[in-house]
């Protein structure tokens, strides 16, 4: 899988990886997992 992200997001991921001594890939997986667990969507058809 490949994705394109804004440069500022890549820079923020790189900074977080550096500060946490983790790889960018590990950080991406962590934030994606968090987002999937915490995403909430409102059904606009019902109100």
Image: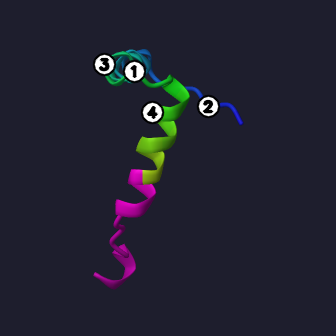
Q: Position of residue 7 (x, y in %)?
A: 43, 15
Query: Image point 34% across, 25% down: which residue?
Result: 20
Q: Helix, strand, or loop for circle 1?
A: loop
Query: Image point 46% across, 52% down: which residue?
Result: 33
Mark drawn on residue 3: 2
Please state which of residues 29 and 44 is positioned toward the viewer in this rendering. Answer: 29
Number of residues whose C-alpha sits closer than 10 Å to that of mark 1, classed few (under 14), some (14–19) or many (20 or more): few
Query: Image point 38% across, 15% down: which residue?
Result: 11
Residue 30 in the magenta stretch? The answer is no
Q: Residue at label 3?
A: 19
Number of residues whose C-alpha sits closer than 10 Å to that of mark 2, classed few (under 14), some (14–19) or many (20 or more): few
Residue span colored magenta = 34-47
Q: Residue at label 4?
A: 27
C-beta proximity under 8 Å, tags 3 and 4: no
Kindly indicate the quadrant of the structure image that contains residue 10.
top left
Disc 4 versus disc 1: distance between alpha carbons?
10 Å
Q: Quadrant of the C terminus?
A: bottom left
């Amino acid at each position: 899988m490949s994705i394109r992200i804004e440069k500022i997001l890549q820079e923020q991921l790189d900074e977080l990886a550096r500060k946490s001594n983790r790889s960018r890939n590990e950080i991406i997986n962590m934030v994606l997992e968090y987002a999937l667990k915490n995403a909430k969507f409102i059904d606009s058809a019902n109100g």
